[in-house]
Image (cartoon, rainbow, N blue to C red):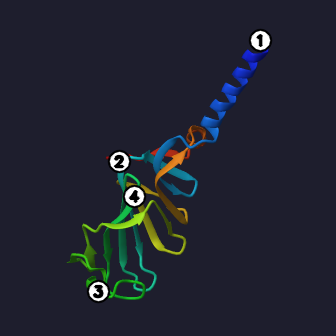
Amino acid sequence: MVGRRRLFLLLAGLALAAVLFAIPVVRVSEVEVGERVLVAGAGARFTVTLEYLHSVELGRVAETYEVTGCEIRLTRLAWPGHGAGLPSSPGDLEAPTATGDGGYILENLSLRLGGALSLSTRYMISPRLVVSGSEIATGGLVEIRACTGRSVAWLLWQWLRGSLDVIAGS
C-alpha cells in the first residue's frame, strides 16, 4: 500500500512539474527587446510605435502597430515623402492619407500582419521604440508576438531575472 502511495505521489509530482515547466499554459502577448520581455494578457490591447530616421532620405518615419487579441495590425504610418524604400505616393497604399508637417500620414489603417512580427533596428538611425506610451531602449531586434503560449516556469524565471515587465494594455 505504501509503495502505491509513493508511486502515485511521484506521478502526480511529475505531472505538476510538466505543467509548470514544459507545457505552455498561459496565453500572453509579448514584446521582446533584447533581454527584456514585456507581456500582457492575450486579450489585452496595446500599441508599439517605432520611429527612426530614414537611412537615405533622412526624414522621420513612424510606424504604429496595434496588438489586439491574437493579431498584430499596422494602424498608422507617417513618412517624409517619396524616396528610396518609401511609398512613392499615398495612392500606392490605397488608404486615406493626410499631408502633415514634412510628409504624409496614413491613419486608421488596419493592415493585418498575423500573430508574429520581427523588426530589426540594428541599422536604423536614431530608432525610438514606444510600447503603450513607455519608451523602451532598442536592442537590435524587436519581436512582437500575439497570443503565444508560455509556461508558468518561464514567466517566473523571466520575472526572477528582472527582465519581465507587464504592459499596461486596455
Q: Amino acid at mark 1?
A: Val
* Of the two numbered discs 2 and 4 in the rendering, the one whose residue sits closer to the viewer: 4
Check disc 1 and report the residue beneath it: 2
Q: CA distance from mark 1 to mark 3?
A: 78 Å
Q: Which residue is mark 4?
A: 71
Precedes in sequence: disc 2 or disc 1: 1
Give the crowd class for mark 4: few <14, some 14-19, many >=20 residues within 10 Å: some
Name the kind of residue labelled 4 in the image: Glu
Residue at image position (40%, 85%) is 57
Tell us which disc is closer to us: 4 or 3: 4
* Residue depicted at x 35% and y 70%: 62
Task: Work out whether 26 lies above or below 6.
Answer: below
Viewport quadrant of the N terminus: top right
User: First in sequence: mark 1 or mark 4?
Assistant: 1
* Mark 3–mark 2 distance (CA, rounded to whole Å): 33 Å
Q: Position of residue 152 (x, y in %)?
A: 56, 38
The residue shown at (36%, 80%) is 59
What separation in Å lies between label 2 and label 1 (alpha carbons)?
A: 51 Å
From the viewer's perspective, is 48 left or right of 165?
Answer: left
Disc number lying in front (2 or 1): 1
Q: Closer to the observer: label 1 or label 4?
A: 1
Q: Earlier in the sequence, mark 2 or mark 4?
A: 4
Q: Earlier in the sequence, mark 1 or mark 3?
A: 1
Q: Position of residue 166 (x, y in %)?
A: 44, 44
Q: Residues within 10 Å of mark 2 (few under 14, many from 20)?
A: some
Is residue 68 left or right of 15 when viewed as pictured? left
Residue located 63% across and 39% down the image: 21
Looking at the image, is mark 4 or mark 3 earlier in the sequence?
Answer: 4
Query: Between marks 2 and 4, how big is the CA–CA gap?
Result: 14 Å
Determine which residue is flagged by label 2.
169
Q: Which residue is mark 3?
A: 89
| 103 or 72, nearer to the observer | 72
